[in-house]
Image (cartoon, rainbow, N blue to C red):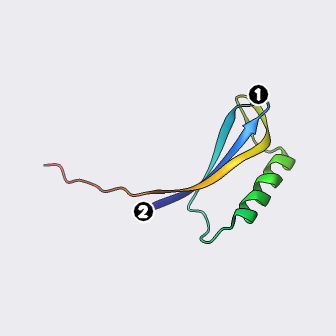
Amino acid sequence: MAKSLELQFINLEGKSTNIGVDAPKENLTAGEISLAMDKIIAANIFTSGGGDLVSKKGARIVDRTVTDLEIK
């Protein structure tokens, strides 16, 4: 099973944009994630097609299970 953390932001154009983090640390709290997102916005280190990131929209942990099938 593969896990990723998806950080959702709003850019200058008012559109949603995401930053994905593979294999996030277990037991992250909403407060820790929110603080990290605040730091990303304040540092202005990422941009998107719609401009700089200006606010938080949300965050989510995505679990994905992959099952390989044997094809003969």
Amino acid type, callout 1 = Glu
Q: Nearer the viewer, residue 44 or 55?
A: 55
Quadrant where the N terminus lies?
A: bottom left
Residue at 80% over, 31% down? 12
Residue at 19% over, 54% down? 70
Task: In the rendered view, tell whether residue 12 sits above or below residue 5.
Answer: above
Residue at 76% over, 35% down? 11
Amino acid type, callout 2 = Met
Q: Position of residue 22 (x, y in %)?
A: 57, 57
Find numbered disc 2 in the image and state the secondary structure of the residue it sits on.
loop
Residue at 75% over, 31% down? 14
For residue 25, side relative to residue 67 (left or right): right
Task: In the rendered view, tell whether residue 8 sits above or below residue 3.
Answer: above
Q: How many other residues sit within 10 Å of disc 1, few (<14), some (14-19) or many (≥20)?
A: few
Q: Position of residue 23 (x, y in %)?
A: 56, 62
Q: Nearer the viewer, residue 66 or 8?
A: 8
Query: What is the quadrant of residue 65 in the picture?
Result: bottom left
Q: Position of residue 2 (x, y in %)?
A: 46, 60
Find numbered disc 1 in the image and state the secondary structure of the residue it sits on.
loop
Q: Residue pushed farthest right?
A: 42
Distance from disc 1 to disc 2, alpha carbons, whole Å, reads: 35 Å
- For residue 1, the mark is 2
Q: Nearer the viewer, mark 1 or mark 2?
A: 1
For residue 69, side relative to residue 32 (left or right): left
- For residue 13, the mark is 1
Query: What is the quadrant of residue 32 in the picture?
Result: bottom right
Task: In the rendered view, tell whether residue 11 sits above or below residue 20.
Answer: above
Count of numbered tags = 2
For residue 33, side relative to residue 38 (left or right): left
- For residue 32, the mark is none
